[in-house]
Amino acid sequence: MAKKKDSKKYKNDKADSPSGDDESSASESTESQYTKPDLTSYVDRLSSPRPEIRKKQLLLIQKELRSNYPAFSDDWNYKETLLSGIESILKKGKLSEQVEALRCLSIYFTQIPYSENQAIGERFQEFFETTLCDSTKPGELRAACATTVAWLHYISEPMGLPYIKNLMEKLSNVFKSACLKGDGMPPDFPKAQIDLHKDCLFAWGLLFTSLPSLDADEVGRNIICHLVSLLQSKYMVVRMAACDVVALVYERIREETKESFKGSYYETLLQVLDDLSFGSNKYTSKADAKKQRSNFRDLFRFLQNHETPTLKVKLASENLNLDTYQKVFTYQAYCHLLTLGINLHLQENMLLRQFFDLGLPLPPIQQNQRVRAADKRMRSLMNEQASKDRKKELSKKRGKKAEFLLEDS
């Protein structure tokens, strides 16, 4: 286990270190600028004998990694302690701990350089593969494993393209079990299995976006028939996940290899999407039908007219324009992974900025600009409140006028 720092020294080393200190003191001072003492203490407690404490620390670590970038310096000496704690929980912890440990690992990938992912991939490869393919393991664990291994290989491809294609085949073997049965009827599954199919579809789609064009063409063509079947699932989350992957497949093939591509199942696909667009699936409740109609109508229009959705995200002083299904899918994936920390990472994390073509991080907004923005917001709120007050006053006057007219009549 890595050597631990004295907490008092850790908190004060930046303030107490004179300019003439040795290299180790300078290193500690640099680390204190980036790494919060809280994160280090959370990592320490992963070795607690109590599972509820370990789970709580994992959730706190997730929060720190999401809400800070960088969350630690390059020479932070607790990386191995963190990975050892996660590895121990994956081997011996309870199911809820294992799921949170995998989520923690997924977020951790966004904080470290590509070079470190090679060792992590080799270290956890056996656990990822055996868990994902073992049908006796809990569905929640297999689902978390699918998303984590997908993030690892999407972000850095530590084991190369052949491994990614092999991994995608294993993921597809899992969600293919949700396809229509021989009699044309969709099968029934418990909730954990439904979520597993949904997450394996997501993981497959994430990895698909990283494939070279020719590989994407080949793999995409071969999966379409299964996606058409999954669009007829009883379960909305599976249908929605399949919808996202269909959009990715057609967009990449049409933009990168064959613009007029339709495929053997094109007419069936359009018919299924048309039915879903109007909520005619007999397994769809009214509430679920309302949620899915917009997505399926957008996909239907894209397949017929090549109309892609557009989404604009406002950051502090820049705009992020999402004008392809691939960008929208990836943005939503990062939103789900980083939750409330997504805007911070879009502004500071080069991993995200490179993908979305945002360039180098912009300099921070000056304090006087922040004050002006705050003043503008305050004026806006005051105007809104004044408008509400006027409406209330007018409403009262109208009420009195109505009463007066009634009395006269």
Image: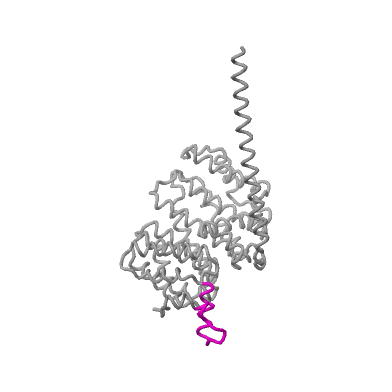
In the rendered image, the quadrant that contains the C terminus is top right
Relative side of 62 to 366, left or right: left
The colour scheme used here is one colour
Residue 78 in the image, given as x and y percentages of width and height: 44, 75
The residue at the far top in this view is 409
The image quadrant that residue 343 belongs to is bottom right
Measuring 66% from the left and 64% from the top, which residue is drawn there? Answer: 366
In the image, is residue 292 above or below residue 176? above
Judge by depth and name the residue closer to the eye, 326 or 351.
351
Tell me where the magenta segment starts and ends, as one range.
Answer: 13-34
Judge by depth and name the residue closer to the eye, 105 or 193.
105
Measuring 57% from the left and 49% from the top, which residue is drawn there? Answer: 265
Q: How many marks?
A: 0
The residue at the far left in this view is 49
In the image, is residue 188 above or below residue 65? above
Magenta includes 28?
yes
Residue 262 in the image, given as x and y percentages of width and height: 63, 51
Relative side of 227 to 389, left or right: left
Residue 330 in the image, given as x and y percentages of width and height: 58, 58
Prevailing secondary structure of the magenta residues: helix
Magenta includes 273?
no
The image quadrant that residue 1 belongs to is bottom left
